[in-house]
Amino acid sequence: MNIFKIIDEFQKIDGDAVDRLEHATRRHFMNRIGSKLAAVAVPTVFASVVNKAYAQSAGAIDILNFALTLEYLEDEFYQKGNAAAGLIPASDKTIFTQIGKHETQHVAFLKGALGTKAVAKPTFDFTGKGAFATVFTNYNTFLTVSHALEDTGVRAYKGQAGGLMGDPDLLQYALQVHSVEARHASIVRKLLGAATGKPEIKSWITGKAGAPEAVYAGDDNKIQGGVDLTGLAGKSDAAITEAFDEPLTKEQVLAIAGLFL
């Protein structure tokens, strides 16, 4: 394993690589690992040096603060919804109480990961500038907004995962939250479908069925990894779209969530 050849490759994609890898000179790196360190352990030590050097990068911090802003949004939304008298039926109250607890924990979790670099909580308008004026008085409206927020959040995390590949710790934080948000999205979709009498809104996504175009842009896509899956193994287009989820870019997410900011 030629450590210094690897450093050269880092330098090709990141001109500041050697500065980041402060122990990457031959002398400093070899002092760091020690002359008696077994050769088999060198890759592990080098990975630790690289991860430390690239952790908490400006890009990663920006992504987690983006996620934190969405979690602030959801946390306050469920706090207000759960506190609104007569809004949530008794049959569903336990579900939204638990979702609310999760969102509060997500905020604390991300703030803990970011430390002093965490952004402050913004002010929200849950009526969507008047589009959802009855959000905390009409249960179907509440479910509709919850549905949009949860599904947008799931695809937002997916869309930003690539930007955290250089920071394994922060990527782990994001993925831990992402999986829980996906469970929220599934149960909220089920509740909304039942409340509105729309069977096309299921616990999973079929194409773009049951949600605004902005939230499900691209979810009817049948090309994955450059391969057109249309007609694969006799499966319907609907079944193929159910098997994959499309990420949303930061710009797409802000276009949706911006309605509430």
Image: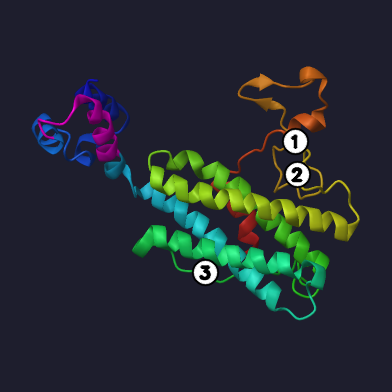
Place of residue 210 in the rendered image (x, y in percent of width and height, measured from the top left): 81, 48
Residue type pointed to by label 2: Trp
How far apart, in angstroms, are the residues tagged by discs 1 and 3?
35 Å
Task: Identify the residue under disc 1.
Answer: 242
In the image, what residue occupies the spot 11% across and 34% down?
A: 34
Q: Residues within 10 Å of mark 3 (few under 14, many from 20)?
A: few
Assign the magenta stretch its main secondary structure: helix
Magenta segment boundaries in residue numbering: 34-50
Label located before the other in sequence (2 or 3): 3
How far apart, in angstroms, are the residues tagged by discs 2 and 3?
31 Å
Under circle 2, the secondary element is loop
* Closer to the eye: label 2 or 3: 2
Q: Is residue 12 magenta?
A: no
> Which label was assigned to residue 204?
2
Q: Answer yes or no: do the residues labelled 1 and 3 have beta carbons within 8 Å?
A: no
Place of residue 151 in the rendered image (x, y in percent of width and height, measured from the top left): 68, 51
Label located before the other in sequence (1 or 2): 2
Q: Is residue 46 magenta?
A: yes
Q: Residues within 10 Å of mark 2 (few under 14, many from 20)?
A: some
Quarter of image, res 232: top right
Place of residue 242 in the rendered image (x, y in percent of width and height, measured from the top left): 75, 36
Horizontal relation, residue 55 to residue 144: left or right? left
Task: Identify the residue under disc 3.
Answer: 122
In the image, what residue occupies the spot 55% across and 61% down?
A: 71
State the count of labels.
Answer: 3
The correct choice, above or below, for 217 with respect to 231 in the image is: below
In the image, what residue occupies the spot 82% across and 19% down?
A: 234
Quarter of the N terminus within the rendering = top left
Q: Answer yes or no: do the residues labelled 1 and 2 have beta carbons within 8 Å?
A: yes
Under circle 3, the secondary element is loop
In the image, what residue occupies the spot 72% across and 27% down?
A: 222
Label located before the other in sequence (1 or 3): 3
